[in-house]
Amino acid sequence: MKKLRVGVLISGRGSNLKALIDATNIENYPAEIVYVISNNPNALGLNHAKEFNIPYHVIDHKKYANREEFDRAMHQKLIEAGVEFICLAGFMRLLTPWFVSQWPNKIINIHPSLLPSFKGSDSHKQAIEAGVRISGCTIHFVSAEMDSGPIILQAVVPVYQDDTEKTLAARVLLKEHESYPFALKLIALGKVEIKSSKVFVGD
Ligand code: GRF
């Protein structure tokens, strides 16, 4: 079976990267992680790449004059590594329209809220402040605007009255780890189609 060659971009802890690695290590999973890039030299998630012998590279955004130069450096590395598809997993940089246009419908992201609610890095705080009774995670194709693009899959958790950002984040994270590998699998199997900016999932 020809597996989809995936590059994962991270900035931090990398628990979603680990969930993806674990899934790709299961026999017959239709994708493989061939490259990991972190913009943060100290990202803990790099340890997962090391542990599983996945080639990785640090591209420190602080060393680039602007976003596009940084994105061009990433693009070159991804192409050199033969990457066909990109998963953002806690990647804390906004991608430029240039980068997104180089990878049309080939970048997905996971966000810890039910989009389009609660975009940004404090989604759990926003959910608690809004008093919503459910939250969850969203896996979506990436467009040039932050936390936007056609939604592939969402998973839901309850929000309890005594939840803190921490307890809610932990509950959502468990769903993230199940959902991200599942969404990638659907894509790698060719079951996901975008029509008029909406995702349709086939059998
Ligand atoms: C996750 O909650 C993800 O949804 C968000 O950033 C967090 C990254 O966590 N985009 P990790 O680095 O995968 O552990």
Image: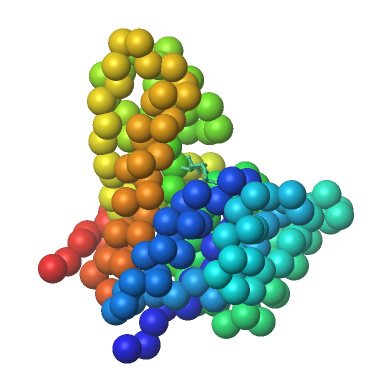
How many numbered marks are there? 0
Please tell me whether residue 68 is drawn above or below residue 74 in the rendered image: above
Quadrant housing residue 32 = bottom left
Question: Which residue shows up at 50% across the image and 72% down it?
Answer: 33
State left or right for residue 111 relative to residue 51: left
Please tell me whether residue 100 is drawn above or below residue 176 in the rendered image: below
Residue 71 in the image: state x and y as whole percent: 70, 61
Residue 128 in the image: state x and y as whole percent: 40, 16
Q: Nearer the viewer, residue 93 or 162?
A: 162
| Image quadrant occupied by the C terminus | bottom left
Please tell me whether residue 190 is drawn above or below residue 44 in the rendered image: below
Please identify the residue farthest to the left as the structure is shown: 203
Question: Which residue shows up at 40% across the image and 39% down it?
Answer: 173
Residue 177 appears in view: yes
| Colouring rule applied to residues | rainbow
Quadrant housing residue 186 = bottom left
Q: Nearer the viewer, residue 5 or 41?
A: 41
| Image quadrant occupied by the N terminus | bottom left
